[in-house]
Structure formats: structure tokens, C-alpha cells
Image (spheres, grey):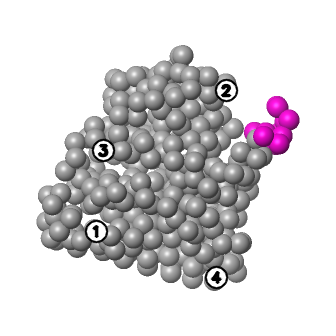
Amino acid sequence: MHSVSTILMGLVALAPLAAAAPANYARQAATSSAAAPAGSAAAVAPAASGAALSDVDILNFALTAEHLESEFYKQGFTKFAMSDFMALGLTQGQVKSLMSVGQTEATHVTTLQSAIATAGGKPVEACIYNFDAALTSASSMVQTARVLEAVGVSAYLGAAPLVNSSDVLAAAASIVTVEARHQAFIRIASGAEPIPAAFDTALGPRAVFTLAAQFIKSCPQGSNLNIQAFPAIALQNPEKATVGQALKLADPAAPAGASFCAFVGPGGNQFVPLTGGNCIVPQGLQGEVYMMITKSKSVVDSEVLAGPSVIQPS
């Protein structure tokens, strides 16, 4: 299996793809910012905040993520044979378990479609995806699966406080526990500690969608979520995203108003000053950690200027 430093380089390098992806969401974000006068509410307000999302919106947000995960595994297992994964050091049993993860994601899709219809909503359809960078090899597929499952757990945790219906919350809870099992298994298959921390990390809808948008090319009419992605973080040296290393923004002057690198993880949020486009990856990070560029020591949507990007210090 790849070393931690190699995995870090691959994972952090994925996030800037969101800036180039021809997704409607990324274009909407850029158009809204460019069209609004500087300092106006339209220039900084998201297309939809967490508080503005209905239970059906949240279910469709979850369905969008499950569609993506299901298709990712489908394409990956079509492209790579069992022998490709076994060449990484996985046993035949582990490869079969990995395949069952994909099958479970497909079941989550049908479960959420039913829940949305029962709630009187219209389920979003699957989009057209671009997994080229994530499926260059069986190794890159496992690395990306590890990130997707971690983000899936974070997405459900972040959405939970926004849900009003106990039935919807129960349905989501029955899925997030399985997503956590997926994540623990894939961490084991990757040679990582299955339980790196005592807690998991919650992410809000905009942050989660920013990570998903990099893979979305386009969606059917009516299946575009009213959620605006943040700009991606562009780093000069993503391979240096390890504890104690200095990270350098590709453009030290962008984004304007940037003051901190925020590291959002199980141990809480850590804020490191961003000076001259540089910040140091702090100590005490565990598991999957989400890096953001912020205006202040806060990761509420209004203070986030770019990101998140994913790093894996342990």
C-alpha cells in the first residue's frame, strides 16, 4: 500500500479539480460573486444556508452524495479486476468486502429515493460524473474511497441538527452508522488505524458539496441542488500537507481577505495564521481533517473563503 505521504499528496491534489469542473454549481458560485457589487449581500450570501433547507432538501442532498458514491464504485469495479486490488496487498476477502461497500451505497440510493417520495418530494436523479483523476489505478480508487466515506459520515453528522422530522432523522441515522463501518474498513484496507479518534467530524452542506462538486460534470434538469460550492484551495505543494510542514497557496494574494488556515477535525478546530500565503500544518490532528481558508477564527459559511481540502495526518 502507498505511504501516508503519498496518500496525502493524492488526496489534497484532488480538491483543486473543483475549480475546473464544469459543474453548474461552480459556475453559479462564480457568476453570483462576479455579478454582485463588492460588499453587497449577494456577493457573500450562499445560494442556500443550512437553516433554509427543508427535510426533503436534506434528503436530496444525501441522495446526491449517495448517487455519486454508488456510481464511483460501479465505475471502479468495472475498470479494475480483483487481482488489481490484491496486488496492493488486499486479501480476496477484503476485496469482496470493498465490493459490498459499493453494493450498500446502491441500496442507500433506493432507500433515500423511497424516503423522499414518502415525504412528498421528488428525488434528484444521478448526475454525469468525472472520476478520471480518482480512478487512475486500483490504489487511487481505494484512496479516494477512503475520503468519500469520511466525507459521507461528516455530511450526515452536519445535516442532523437541520432535520425537523424524527422519521427523517432515523432514516439518516440508519445510513450514517453503515457509512462509518465503511470508513473503518477502508482505513484498515489502507493500512491506517480504523478508529483514529474518539469522535467524527461534522461538515455543513456547502463544505460537503464543495468536495463533491469536483466530480460532477452536469446534472439533469431539476436535479441541481440549491447549494453553492466554495472556491477550491489551490496549493503550490500539496505533498507537504503533513504535520509541521508549511503549506503554500498557489496565489499568495488569493483569496482576498484570507487570514487563517482552519483545520477542522475530531479534536476540534485549529486556526493557523496565514502569512504571505503560507501556513503550518498544526500538531494534534487525527484521522481525516478538513482544511479551509477563512477570514476569522470561525468556519461558519460567511467566514469561509475557500475549501475544504482533505488531509490525512493519521
Query: Can see residue 161?
Result: no
Residue at screen point 50% across, 81% down? 110
Q: Depth-wise, is mark 3 or mark 1 nearer the camera?
A: 1
Is 149 contained in the magenta span? no
Q: Depth-wise, is mark 4 or mark 3 nearer the camera?
A: 3
Q: Earlier in the sequence, mark 1 or mark 4?
A: 1
User: Which three-letter amino acid code belongs to the residue tagged 2?
Assistant: Ala
Give the position of the C terminus as an image quadrant.
top left
- According to the image, label 2 marks what residue? 256
Is 40 contained in the magenta span? yes
- According to the image, label 1 marks what residue? 80
- According to the image, label 4 marks what residue? 117
Q: Secondary structure at mark 2?
A: loop
Q: Residue 7, labelled with which disc?
A: 3
Q: Residues within 10 Å of mark 2 (few under 14, many from 20)?
A: few
Q: Earlier in the sequence, mark 1 or mark 2?
A: 1
Q: Give the CA separation, mark 1 to mark 4.
A: 35 Å
Nearest the viewer among 177 and 102 is: 102
Bounds of the magenta span? 34-44
Q: Earlier in the sequence, mark 4 or mark 3?
A: 3
- Contact between labelled residues 1 and 3, with CB atoms less than 8 Å apart: no
Q: Secondary structure at mark 1?
A: loop
Q: Residue 244, labelled with which disc?
A: none
User: Which three-letter amino acid code belongs to the residue tagged 4?
Assistant: Ala
Place residue 286 in its image quadrant: top left
Q: Residues within 10 Å of mark 3 (few under 14, many from 20)?
A: many
Report x, y in % for residue 226: 71, 59
Q: Secondary structure at mark 4?
A: helix
